[in-house]
Image (cartoon, grey):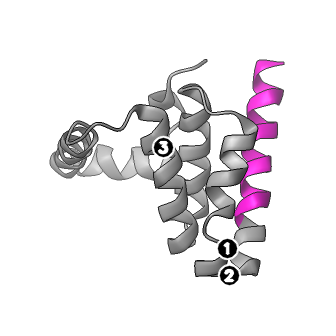
């Protein structure tokens, strides 16, 4: 699949272009966190999806859906990861996240043809 770096949101790219030191610091922290324990990339992306559901962050959620798939997550795993938050964050937010996930999955399918 394609490289996640090329699919970063334009706003994010614009921000780190204007503030490169902040972008570099952000990347450094992300790498340190990712290597801080035994979880693999797919597990980390599924967990980050759950965090995004709880925080109601659509753009970040969709990015982590894409990355989870790039690291081998199945559609069933994507759905379970987002459904896990239903009793905590509620039905409406879970349904919204389910819609976001399927938008991203369909977008990726359309791009790969």
The quadrant of the picture occupied by the C terminus is: top right
Q: Say which residue label 1 marks.
A: 86
Crowding at dot 1, Cα within 10 Å, few <14 / some 14-19 / many 20+, comes out as: some
Residue 45: which numbered mark, if any?
3
**Image height check: is 20 above or below 69?**
below
* Residue 83 in sight in this render: yes
**Image height check: is 12 above or below 70?**
below
Q: Nearer the viewer, residue 47 or 96?
A: 47
**Sequence-first disc among 2 and 3:** 3
Q: Say which of marks 1 and 3 sits in front.
A: 1
User: Residue drawn 54% across and 54% down?
Assistant: 49
Secondary structure under badge 2? loop
**Sequence-first disc among 1 and 3:** 3
Q: Nearer the viewer, residue 79 or 24?
A: 79
Magenta-tinted stretch: 97-113
The quadrant of the picture occupied by the N terminus is: top right
Residue 90: which numbered mark, if any?
2
Q: Is residue 98 magenta?
A: yes
Secondary structure, magenta segment, majority class: helix
Q: Nearer the viewer, residue 46 or 13?
A: 46
Q: Position of residue 68 (x, y in %)?
A: 56, 37
Alpha carbons under labels 1 and 2: distance apart: 5 Å
Alpha carbons under labels 2 and 3: distance apart: 21 Å
Q: Nearer the viewer, residue 16 or 62?
A: 62
User: Residue drawn 76% across and 79% down?
Assistant: 92
């Amino acid at each position: 699949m394609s490289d996640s770096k090329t699919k970063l949101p334009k706003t994010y790219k614009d921000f780190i272009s204007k503030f490169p030191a902040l972008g570099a610091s952000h990347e450094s922290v992300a790498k340190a966190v990712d290597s801080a324990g035994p979880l693999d990339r797919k597990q980390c992306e599924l967990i980050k999806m759950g965090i995004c559901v709880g925080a109601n962050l659509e753009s970040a959620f969709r990015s982590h859906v894409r990355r989870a798939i790039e690291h081998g997550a199945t559609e069933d795993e994507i759905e379970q990861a987002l459904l896990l938050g239903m009793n905590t964050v509620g039905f409406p937010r879970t349904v919204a996240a389910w819609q976001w996930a399927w938008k991203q999955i369909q977008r990726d399918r359309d791009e790969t043809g």
